[in-house]
Amino acid sequence: MNGKVIAITGASGALGRVVVEAATALGAKIAAIDHAPSQANSSPNRTDLGGVDLSDARQAQQAIDAAAAYFGRLDALINIAGAFSFQSITDGETATWERLHRINTLTALHASRAAIPHLLASGAGRIVNIGALGALQAGAGMGPYAASKSGVHRLTEALAAELEGKVTVNAVLPSTIDTPANRRDMPDSDFASWVTPLELANVILFLASDQASAVTGALIPVKGRV
């Protein structure tokens, strides 16, 4: 990953921060994109682009173009931006379905579409999306979230087919990620069985590396430790 230029969306979240740190430790140059305000970090190896609504195609295009312009190129895009909501179908609101589709599916679509010209120019472009193991078969209360992440799965497969031989496109499908928010929301769970952000980051960064040149269109479960 040394010298690779990587745009990471959702960079200030629990997973995003760990992926940024792990990629930086491997020598990558990072464009950290997030809906949250920018921390104004700027260095030869990092630029922060805050206040970006990636569900808006125009804002996504501007952010990705700014990232590529800052470093002179873009080698990989990691789509982490997203949200979760647990809501039943019978008592829930249509607005939740629309919100999760916008935050989970459209952010990945718009960022990917904006990045494609830059990734083609790289010659070894990579896109890594964050799907969900729970989207393979939705349980009660998981309908809106699973539907939006299923959209990410189908986006991954279709885009991999479109860009075959030019840019690899893959997704990781984590089970529950061990974050402070998840521990707070599920205090009686077995935290030791969850996948840690670093474990997930290691899989993500492998898919973004040159070593994963033969992997594309894959939906890779990351279930946690056994």
Image (tube, rainbow, N blue to C red):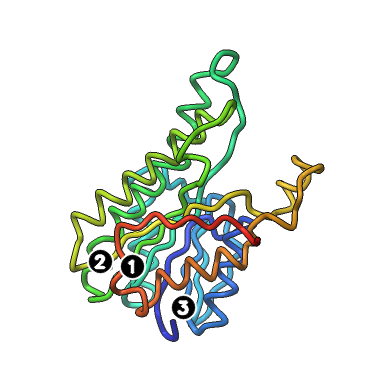
Identify the residue under disc 3.
Answer: 29
Mark 2 near mark 1, Cβ–Cβ under 8 Å? yes
The residue positioned 48% from the left and 55% from the top of the image is 221
**Label 2 neighbourhood size at 10 Å, few (<14), some (14-19), many (20+)?**
many
| Secondary element at image label 1 | strand
Q: Mark 2 points at which residue?
A: 167
The amino acid at mark 3 is: Lys
The residue furthest top is: 90
On screen, residue 30 versus residue 164, left or right, reads right
Q: Where does the C terminus fall, quadrant-wise?
A: bottom right
Q: Mark 2: which secondary structure?
A: strand
N-terminal of the pair, mark 1 or mark 3, is 3
Residue 131 spot, x, y in % from top left: 46, 49
As measured in the structure, the alpha-carbon distance from the residue carrying label 1 to the one carrying label 3 is 14 Å
Query: Label 1 amino acid?
Result: Arg
Are discs 1 and 3 less than 8 Å apart at CB?
A: no
Query: In whole angstroms, how far apart are the C-alphas of marks 3 and 2?
Result: 19 Å
Q: Which residue is drawn at 62% across and 62% down?
A: 197
Instruction: Tell me the tag on residue 126.
Output: 1
Q: In screen coordinates, is 192 left or right of 35?
A: right
